Structure formats: C-alpha cells, structure tokens
Image (cartoon, rainbow, N blue to C red):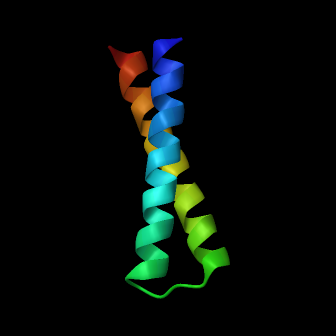
Amino acid sequence: MKTLLTGIAIFAVITILCFAVLTTFFDVNQGVAAIIGLVIGGLCEWLFHRNVNRS
C-alpha cells in the first residue's frame, strides 16, 4: 500500500511540475503541455514501480 501511494504522489508531482515548466518557461500550449506532463509522469511512475518490484 505504501508503494502504491508513493507512486501516485510521484505521478502527481512530476505531472504538475512538467506542466508548470512547459507552460511558464517554454510557452507551450496548455493542451500539449498537459499531454506531455501526463506521459512523463506516467513514465516516471512506471519506472518507480519497475525498480521497486525488482528489489
């Protein structure tokens, strides 16, 4: 249960940070920034769970 909540927190934080950085500093359209943020957040969560399950 702890790793599930950690994965959700990683996904949420990475997604919000990517969206904020892309829209603020790179002036990317909000729709594109949201999709990119979701993809990067999902990738980070997947990598986290993959590494946790190997241990």
The image quadrant that residue 33 belongs to is bottom right
Whether 48 is drawn above or below 27: the answer is above
Q: Residue at x 51, y 43 (%)?
A: 11
Whether 42 is drawn above or below 17: the answer is above
Looking at the rendered image, the quarter that the N terminus falls into is top right
Residue 21 x/y as whole percent:
40, 71
Whether 36 is drawn above or below 41: the answer is below
Q: Residue at x 50, y 50 (%)?
A: 41
Q: Residue at x 51, y 67 (%)?
A: 19
Q: Nearer the viewer, residue 43 or 32?
A: 32
Residue 24 x/y as whole percent:
43, 80
Residue 26 x/y as whole percent:
41, 85
Q: Residue furthest left?
A: 55
Whether 10 is drawn above or below 25: the answer is above
Q: Residue furthest right?
A: 31
Q: Residue at x 51, y 55 (%)?
A: 15
Q: How many marks?
A: 0
Looking at the rendered image, the quarter that the C terminus falls into is top left
